[in-house]
Image (cartoon, rainbow, N blue to C red):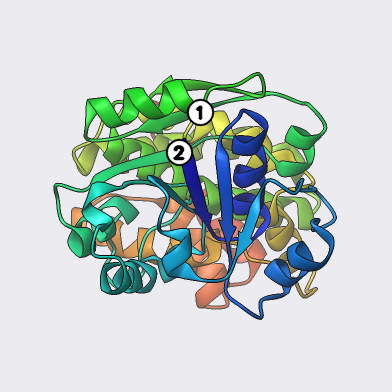
Amino acid sequence: MKISVLGCGRWGSFIAWYLDTIGHKISLYGRAGSEHIKAFQETRTNGQIRFNERVAIVTDLKEALQAETIVISIPSQNLRSLLQQIRQIEPAYAEKTFVLCMKGIEIESGKRLSEVFYEEMGKNSRLAVWLGPGHVQEFVAGVPNCMVIDSDKEEVKEKLVAEFKGPLIRFYYGNDMIGNEIGAASKNVIGIAAGLLDGMGLSSLKGALMARGTREIARLIAKMGGNELSAYGLCHLGDYEATVFSPYSHNRAFGEKYAKGEPYELLAEGYYTVKALKKMAEENGVDLPICNAVYAVLYENLPLKEALSTLFTRSLKTEF
């Protein structure tokens, strides 16, 4: 299969590397002048993965769009503008299969990324989402993991799972786009909360964070029309080790640095997602105490100890 990966950051580059290792013809696209694409053009490596010569490194978006399958891995808030570009320069976009390897919610609209995609590309477009745990550093070291591919169209999902499976990744068929997308996006917020606890020296609370964080996201998924059990699957709870504990987690590291008053320069999607989640929860009448506390800390400068006290002094209730 001829596949183009749009996005040459940490995850997009790994996806291109992985798909090449299982035998697909791969192009990796990045904007001309970006540091990531420049490194690959000059040395074939970004310090974590190394491409062989058969992987094409391209900076022409129209050229990249000639593949039959287009994998997108970019910051979630940039998705709509990229789709608008694709629609303008590639008349045959409706004939292609698109795969979103990204986790987030559009802040301005509060919409899931698949909703953004369908708004821009049409409901009949062939779309799937590829979600689940794993870090580049572990995959390239040969550590396998499990992930999920979901789509509103069964034939798209089945074809991609068959084409993308390999010794490093065991795929499961998703059957809940709402739950999988919300769960995947919100786990980054829980990751920031975990980092805040680490930074406060309260790592022992991360067990409670996992249990209660999953419950509140399950409530949101159910209210949005999804299956609340998705919160306990690979998209959310199954991704907690990689997000809540791993030293490679950007969101956890961001939270820890924030708690210590130290700068953090890398992308932490949860910072944006919590804003969208707050809006989504208010519109649907769902209580998200942990997400609300993270929002208050990051956007309203609520002191960390006060945020924690707010959670601990909530009214008493049964666990389930």
Q: Nearer the viewer, residue 148 or 85?
A: 85
Q: Is residue 134 visible?
A: yes
Q: Secondary structure at mark 1?
A: helix
Q: Nearer the viewer, residue 115 or 195?
A: 115
Work out whether 173 lies above or below 191.
Answer: above
Q: Amino acid under label 2?
A: Trp
In the image, taking residue 54 as reference, residue 178 lies left or right, namely left
Residue 124 in the image, given as x and y percentages of width and height: 14, 47
Q: Secondary structure at mark 2?
A: strand
Callout 2 touching callout 1 (CB < 8 Å): yes
Work out whether 80 lies above or below 196.
Answer: below
Residue 10 in the image, given as x and y percentages of width and height: 68, 55
Q: Residues within 10 Å of mark 1 (few under 14, many from 20)?
A: some
Q: Nearer the viewer, residue 206 or 188?
A: 188
Q: Which residue is mark 2?
A: 130
In the image, taking residue 86 as reference, residue 147 lies left or right, namely right
Q: Is residue 77 visible?
A: no
Query: Which quadrant: the C terminus?
Result: top left
Q: Which mark is residue 164?
A: 1
Residue 131 in the image, given as x and y percentages of width and height: 48, 38
Quarter of the view holding residue 65: bottom left
Q: Residue furthest bottom?
A: 33
Work out whether 165 lies above or below 187.
Answer: above
Q: Which residue appears at 33% of the width and 28% of the height? A: 157
Q: Which residue appears at 80% of the width and 73% of the height? A: 262
Rounded to the nearest angstrom, the CA distance separating label 2 from label 1 is: 10 Å
